[in-house]
């Protein structure tokens, strides 16, 4: 159980275009999803927290107009990188938390999406 | 915010050896998870252990929340254990967010 999928696994796009990444919880309902970014040989950095039916909460320094997050249902969150530039190239990973208040805080991670902007 | 420090940053061992990875954190937590990141980038959940001790095969973990550290033990290491191990914590006042340590890169030589 507790499987999270991401699509696509890899994407190459031209500078100036927008890219959408999907994150799905396959066997549980995720009230909260998270988006992380990882640079080569570095750790994961949280970009934003996404709650179903409400606006995402962005971490300091993350441009909300550039990284659009939509958590439309309890099993799907999307990250859209708008007007992508080469510096947006990175490994993007989502996670999902199924626990409600008083329950487990354990997060389960998707396999990641490698974005390359030419 | 909460600080997470993992040690050692790199560890090279021979197959069959035992290893201990450490994670120190600077504040009270209600979430602590250990992960193994495989060569394709997937984070594999090893333990959810905000306190106490757990074991799963050759791996075990202990978190002493009052002293703000956690340990991951790997016994009888195999080459497939190689990779990066991350500790991530969620602060009690942290709104469910996970903060990751910098990782320990483990290399197991045959």
Image (cartoon, coloured by chain):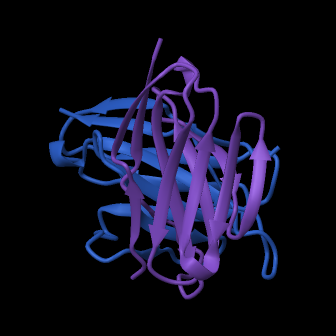
Q: What number of labels is visible?
A: 0
Is any part of residue B81 visible from this angle?
Answer: yes
Q: Colour of chain B?
A: purple
Give chain A's shade.
blue
Judge whether residue A45 can be spotted in this image: no
For residue A7, side relative to residue B10 (left or right): right
Q: Residue at x 52, y 70 (%)?
A: A49
Q: Quadrant of residue B31?
A: bottom right
Q: Is residue B88 above or below residue A16?
A: below
Comparing A60 with B51, the one in front is B51
Q: Nearer the viewer, residue B8 or A57?
A: B8
Residue B47, image x, y percentages: 69, 52
Residue at 53% in and 46% down? B20
Q: Quadrant of the N terminus of chain A?
A: top right
User: Is B17 on the left-hand or right-hand side of B99?
Assistant: right
Residue B22, compared with residue B42, is above or below; it is below
Q: Position of residue B102 (x, y in %)?
A: 36, 54
Where in the figure is residue A109, as x and y percent of width and height?
Answer: 60, 48
Measured as percent of width and height from the top left, residue A71 is found at 60, 64
Residue B88 lies left or right of residue A26; in this view the side is left
Name the outermost residue toward the bottom: B93
Query: For the point 48% across and 27% down, which residue is it?
Result: B82
Q: Quadrant of residue B92?
A: bottom right
**Above or below — where is A59 with respect to A96?**
below
Quadrant where the image shows the C terminus of chain A: top left
Name, please, the residue furthest toward the front: B17
């Amino acid at each position: 159980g507790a499987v999270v999928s991401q699509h696509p696994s890899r994407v190459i796009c031209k500078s100036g275009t927008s890219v959408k990444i999907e994150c799905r919880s396959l066997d549980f309902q995720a009230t909260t999803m998270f988006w992380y970014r990882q640079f080569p040989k570095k750790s994961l950095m949280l970009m934003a927290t996404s709650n179903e039916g409400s606006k995402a909460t962005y971490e300091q320094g993350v441009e909300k107009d550039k990284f659009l997050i939509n958590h439309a249902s309890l099993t799907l969150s999307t990250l859209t990188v708008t007007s992508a530039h080469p510096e947006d190239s990175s490994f993007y990973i989502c996670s999902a938390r199924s626990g409600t208040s008083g329950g487990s805080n354990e997060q389960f991670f998707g396999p990641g999406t490698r974005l390359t902007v030419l | 915010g909460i600080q997470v420090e993992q040690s050692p940053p790199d560890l090279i061992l021979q197959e069959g050896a035992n290893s201990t990875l450490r994670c120190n954190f600077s504040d009270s937590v209600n979430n602590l998870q250990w992960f193994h990141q495989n060569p394709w980038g997937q984070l594999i959940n090893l333990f959810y252990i905000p306190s106490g001790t757990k074991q799963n095969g050759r791996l075990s973990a202990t978190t002493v929340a009052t002293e703000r550290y956690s340990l991951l033990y790997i016994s009888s290491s195999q080459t497939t254990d190689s990779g990066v191990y991350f500790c991530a914590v969620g602060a009690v006042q942290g709104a469910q967010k996970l903060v990751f340590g910098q990782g320990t890169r483990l290399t197991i030589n045959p």
